[in-house]
């Protein structure tokens, strides 16, 4: 099993880690987006980058915030308009599996 990059960042550069997570906290609690919408948008962005692991992790978070399986699916499929089939090919199955197992 590979190391968790966030744990390594915390141990190697705790001030940077704190600043990073403070930024995430500020962005997620800014008030303009509810938690579910925030997660769906984040998933869509990560899909365009082909980051299946991140998409799977945030799928579980989105489900916790009330996202349906169909909302996850459609968020991923929307990436077809932006980056073609690559994001769907690398992220759809892992995300749906993460949803079903969360």
Image (spheres, rainbow, N blue to C red):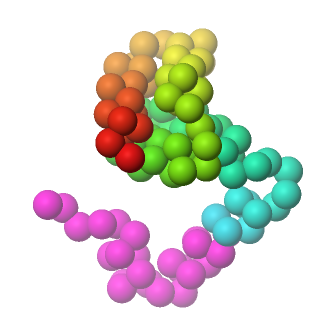
Q: Quadrant of residue 28?
A: bottom right
> Does 55 appear above or below 7?
above
The residue at 65%/75% (across/down) is 22
The span shown in magenta is: 1-23
Q: Is residue 24 visible?
A: yes
Horizontal relation, residue 90 to residue 66: left or right:
left
Please identify the quarter of the rendering in which residue 78 is found: top right
Q: Quadrant of the N terminus?
A: bottom left
- In the image, is residue 12 part of the stretch drawn in magenta? yes
| Rendered residue at 42%/20% (across/down) | 88
Q: Quadrant of residue 12?
A: bottom left
Query: Can residue 52 be seen in this snapshot?
Result: no
Left or right: where 70 falls relative to 26: left
- The x and y percentages for residue 96 are 38, 30
Q: Position of residue 57 (x, y in %)?
A: 41, 49
- Is residue 81 rendered to the left or right of residue 99? right
Residue 36, x across and y down, in percent:
66, 45
Residue depicted at x 41% and y 81%: 10
Q: Give the main secondary structure of the magenta stretch.
A: helix
| Residue plotted at (18% across, 61% down) | 2
């Amino acid at each position: 099993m590979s190391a968790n990059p966030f744990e390594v960042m915390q141990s190697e550069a705790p001030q940077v880690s704190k600043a990073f997570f403070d930024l995430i906290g500020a962005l997620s609690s800014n008030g303009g987006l509810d938690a579910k919408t925030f997660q769906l948008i984040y998933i869509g962005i990560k899909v365009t980058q082909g980051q299946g692991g991140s998409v799977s992790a945030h799928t579980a978070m989105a489900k916790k915030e009330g996202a349906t399986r169909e909302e996850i699916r459609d968020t991923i499929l929307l990436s077809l308009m932006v980056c073609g089939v690559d994001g769907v090919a690398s992220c759809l199955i892992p995300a749906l599996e993460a949803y079903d197992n969360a």
